[in-house]
Amino acid sequence: MKIRGAGRIARAAVKALEDYGDSLDVSGGRDFVERVREAGEYLKGARPTAVSLPNAINYVVLNLEKEAKGVEDVASLKAALKKYCESFVERSESAVEKIGLLGARLIQDGDTILTHCNSEAAISVILTAHRQQKNIKVFCTETRPKGQGYLTSSKLAKNGVDVTLIVDSAVNFFIKKVDQVVVGADAIYVNGAVVNKIGTSQVALVANQAKSRFMVAAESYKIAPKTFVGELIPIEERSPEEVVSGEWAQENKEVKIRNPSFDVTPPKYIDSIVTEVGIFPPEGIILLYRETYGLS
């Protein structure tokens, strides 16, 4: 897992698609588009839970297909592919900045924040509040087994934020000190449920019991269209070797090891979902989805 974060993965995927398209040596526009489409389908399989990846690929490929109708000049189609890939990357990076500005409005001077995993959007909210001279403190969970919390706490500390790294199992111990939880999302259901790093739903449950506010900071392209028709978002399970050493596993073959990477936080535990186009209650996501896809 070289690239972490759903937004970063989506941007890396479209950049890879652009590079692949630029390298193609084909004779006609139809062949070019078909090869790009096939590569896009391959890239979609890299991260089945992070819906930003297929949404990014679909944005590029569908726009390319529209522009390619009746066009056989490969050079012009390569230029079109580059245009749409760069457009998505720019949109994605701009979204993170806008989310930071909007989300920081919900952070009060003196707040203590808890964050889980390593979300660009969540970090943007926290750093924006800090740059606005709000006196905030932050707890970062380790986020086992991969330890994304080390990345988050390091970045916040290097930017001057008062940050404390805690083990995942200590969330309930510290939650009474927390005014607001700020997390990202790998995918969002149209009903406002959020798919994020494993452990997020437990943090949300504890926060709800402690009456701490719970904010999700996420780009609008993380809404999963297929959930509109009742499909579920698949939850990736990763290698047991992320949890235990190979030697331990060999010595304890009778022990089963499960390593789901994500979980689903119900909308009832979420106070706000901050996107680049506005701040929504969970039940407002269906309205954003309808507006985005032109549904009445």
Image (spheres, grey):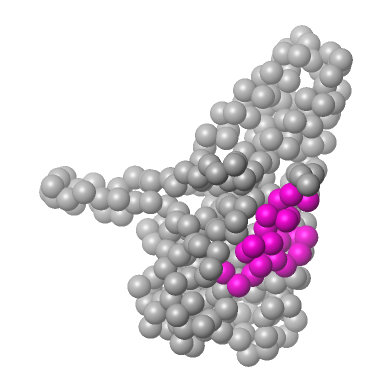
In x, y percent, where is residue 256?
A: 21, 49
Residue interval drawn in magenta = 270-292
146 relative to 136, above or below: above
* Left or right for 251, reference 68: left
Residue at (43, 45) in percent of width and height? 236
Q: Is residue 120 visible?
A: no
Can you give x and y, in whole percent of width and height, for residue 27 in the image?
77, 9
Judging depth in this view, the residue of 138 and 284 nearest the camera is: 284
Residue at the spot 53% in from the left edge and 42% down from the top edge: 231
In the image, taking residue 231 as reference, residue 136 lies left or right, namely: right
Q: Is residue 94 magenta?
A: no
Q: Would residue 200 be visible to someone looking at this image?
A: yes
Image location of residue 166, percent across then percent down: 42, 76
Q: Is residue 291 magenta?
A: yes
Where residue 71 appears, as percent x and y from the top left, is 86, 16
**215 or 84: nearer the eye?**
215
